[in-house]
Amino acid sequence: MRRLAFASTAAAGGVAWLSQDYQSGPARTARSLCCGVAIGIDYKVAGRLPHGSDEHAAAMREAHERGAQRLLALCRAHGGLYNKLGQYLASMTSALPPQYTSTLSACQDRAAPVALVEVRETVETQLGAPLASLFAEFDDAPVAAASLAQVHRAVLSDGRSVAVKVQYPRVAGQVASDLGSMRLLSALAEAAFPGAGYGWIIGEFEAAAETPPPPPAQPPPHTRASTRDELDFRNEAANAAACAALFAAEPRVHARDRLALPDGAMEGACSLSAGVGSGAKLDDPAALLAAGVQPAEVAPLLTATFSAMVFEHGFVHCDPHAGNLLARRMPQAGARDGRGGGGGGGGGGAQLVLLDHGLYRRLSEDYRLAYAQLWCALLAQDDAAGRAAASALGVPPDDYETLAIALTFRPPGSRAPLGSGMSATERRAIRERYASVGPAEADGMPRCASALSRLDLGSTSAQSRLNLGQVNAFLGRLPRDMLFVMRTWGLVRSLNRALGGTTRQRFVTMATYATRGAHRRRPSARAEPAAAGAAWLPGQLLRACAACRRRTALWLAAWRVWSAVLRFRARVAFEGLAARLALGEGGGAVEGLLAPGAKQFG
């Protein structure tokens, strides 16, 4: 039976490759199965070598590299949702070998655009009029090509410059079959390699493409969250409007404005925005400098923006890779709509431009509050409060220590100063806890614990071996919202590092917003007037005392966090001063030492 299944899969894959059919569902499924079988055979062959030997380690590295290249070729050939999958897998540095995450990061680059004739057909169908009557100018070549759509520069009849985002033809019809193929591949991989623990990833990818509704102040045109929401640009427009409203008072953050379509237009596969976003990608230091932006300016702004989203607003842009974020000089006054400024001609400091608003996650108020309290407890080194907050988030008690290591790079209850490494005693305790998971690194830490503490497998020793099944089992037990936010933080952390930011600076910024978020209560959670018949004095006093106790506890937690932050800032200042004095720079060294990472919104 296995031979028959393999033969039929190989035959179907061969037919798909020979026919060069990249559009129909059966051909795409057959090609995906062929790729999956080839990768699986590679691992089975490598797995026959003695575990722990140099030959086995070398064979696994080669299998990782070949598998990553095959998967990248598949994503590139199919495009659409497969390219989106490649982007998602590239961000899973905590769960996948580094060969996959580094190779699949190519999916974040410019995709292959479609021909103008297909773009014209889509635009005219959606907007209900010929292209020539809709626009005075329409550039033939796209200025950007992403996974699901491409963007053209155009000029309206009234002279306004706009960006026209056009969905690729046939993408919407391929979603169901592509997701089915991915589920099938995931099930086959789980059956063939039961210890790997990758079964949850495809489910999370499907969930990552879901877009919950924006805040109540910006009601969406529809409320059903599904993978197809990203293909409906009405949802993206609602998300963009909601994000712009959240940062309306913060000129350093810009969400591109959406324009109303002509009467009778069917907005769904086509949308208009106010101008093409100008700026430089965050992972391109040369382009940032050419735009007049210092990377050191952008790093704290990036962390502050997403800290505000997570801790204060609970409305999170879930796809902050380098292709969806730009930085530029702040436009001159009156040019905030993107028609002016940009490049090096802006008048203010750095401005972060958020693109592609298709993927957002609306966190419940209870989750947002508990998550902010979790970070307050972790940064204040309050083990009891941290465990209580993690329990409120749905984290199993046995996973709390692992979660703390993953988030803060140190175990709970650590007395080390904020931003410092683990002590020898803490390292020894973690080494004993994870001794059964995998071999140690050069510093004596088990690779599993080291990988979890950094959420970055690419920085671990090439000679050591990690039991990824243990890591994936831990990630699979976490609540879904926790995984969404952890993935977002992973992307932000990677960009922060590319911009020259440090972990210490990032923690200071996050502590600021976690403290604010822990005090921000939803209106329904505040004390409400008692009913007329039940308003008796003892009850009122009890409620007032309870509210006062909660408020006092929050302020005490905030003070613990801020005292840790102040100790950290003093430590950074004195370390920097000592380093400068050692280099002979002298008296002016103190100035500016407290600035990195400390400038926040408000």
Image: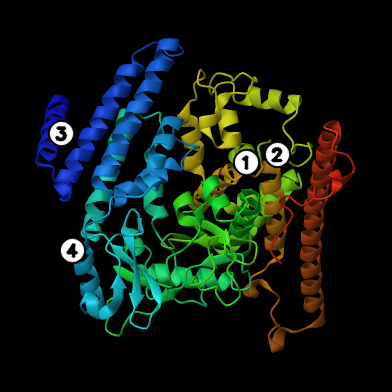
Mark 2 is surrounded, within 10 Å at the Cα level, by few (under 14), some (14 to 19) or many (20 or more) other residues, namely many
User: Rounded to the nearest whole Å, what is the CA distance between mark 1 and mark 2?
Assistant: 8 Å
Q: Are marks 2 and 3 in contact (CB under 8 Å)?
A: no
**Residue in the image at 39% along x and 69% along y:** 235
Q: Residue beneath label 3, please?
A: 9
Q: Please tell me the numbered disc located at residue 412.
A: 2
Mark 1 is surrounded, within 10 Å at the Cα level, by few (under 14), some (14 to 19) or many (20 or more) other residues, namely some
Q: Nearer the viewer, mark 4 or mark 2?
A: 4
Labels 1 and 3: the sequence-earlier one: 3
Q: Please tell me the numbered disc located at residue 400.
A: 1
User: Rounded to the nearest whole Å, what is the CA distance between mark 2 and mark 3?
Assistant: 49 Å
Q: Is residue 136 left or right of residue 433?
A: left
Horizontal and vertical percent position of residue 435: 59, 21
Q: Is residue 187 visible?
A: no
Horizontal and vertical percent position of residue 376: 71, 52
Q: Nearer the viewer, residue 334 or 315?
A: 334
Q: Residue beneath label 4, please?
A: 117
Q: Please tell me the numbered disc located at residue 114.
A: none
Residue 96: which quarter of the image? Answer: top left
User: Rounded to the nearest whole Å, what is the CA distance between mark 4 and mark 2?
Assistant: 59 Å
Q: Is residue 373 left or right of residue 128?
A: right
Horizontal and vertical percent position of residue 50: 40, 10
Mark 3 is surrounded, within 10 Å at the Cα level, by few (under 14), some (14 to 19) or many (20 or more) other residues, namely many
The residue most toward the right is: 587
The image shows a total of numbered marks equal to 4
User: Rounded to the nearest whole Å, what is the CA distance between mark 1 and mark 3?
Assistant: 43 Å
Horizontal and vertical percent position of residue 587: 90, 43
The residue most toward the bottom is: 532
Q: Amino acid at mark 3?
A: Thr
User: In the picture, which quadrant includes the C terminus?
Assistant: bottom right
